[in-house]
């Protein structure tokens, strides 16, 4: 499992973010991986869906987790929105 520390948060998490208006969850996942890890990626199968409740300044929503496939150490991951990454 690949975890990142994004530049906008202090904690480890899987790469991700919010979808744009009229963007599918699959397209949003691919865009977020490109932004956070600098990788062109085609999301694999859907692994899970989680409900996120109301939080300060945010509405409730759904989180989708897609299979990321295998990324080897020979394919560095670290885009402009990622401070650190680790497997």
Image (tube, rainbow, N blue to C red):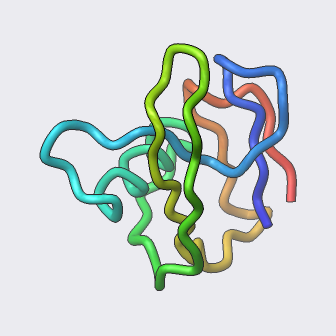
Residue with the most extreme left position = 22
Residue at point 58%, 72% (across, down): 68
Q: Residue 44: give x, y in percent of width and height.
A: 47, 80
Residue 40, image x, y percentages:
41, 57
Q: Position of residue 29 (x, y in %)?
A: 42, 55
- Front residue (pair 48, 54): 54
Q: Which residue reaches farthest bottom? A: 45
Query: 12 left or right of 26?
Result: right
Left or right: 27, with 16 as reference point? left
Q: Is residue 10 above or below residue 79?
A: above
Query: Residue placed at 55% from the left, 25% from the top?
Result: 80
x, y (%) of residue 82?
A: 66, 30
Question: Compared to 60, does 39 lie above or below?
Answer: below
Residue 28 vertical position relative to residue 59 in the rendered view, above or below: below
Q: Residue at x 66, y 60 (%)?
A: 75
- Which one is in front, 51 or 8? 51
Quarter assignment of residue 84: top right
């Amino acid at each position: 499992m690949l975890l990142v520390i994004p530049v906008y948060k202090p904690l480890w998490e899987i790469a991700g973010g919010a979808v744009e208006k009229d963007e599918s969850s699959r397209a949003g996942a691919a865009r977020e991986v490109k932004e956070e890890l600098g990788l062109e990626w085609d999301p694999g199968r859907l692994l899970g869906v989680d409900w996120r409740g109301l939080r300060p300044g945010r509405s409730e929503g759904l989180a989708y987790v897609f299979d990321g496939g295998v990324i080897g150490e020979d394919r560095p991951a670290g885009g402009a929105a990622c401070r650190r990454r680790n497997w």
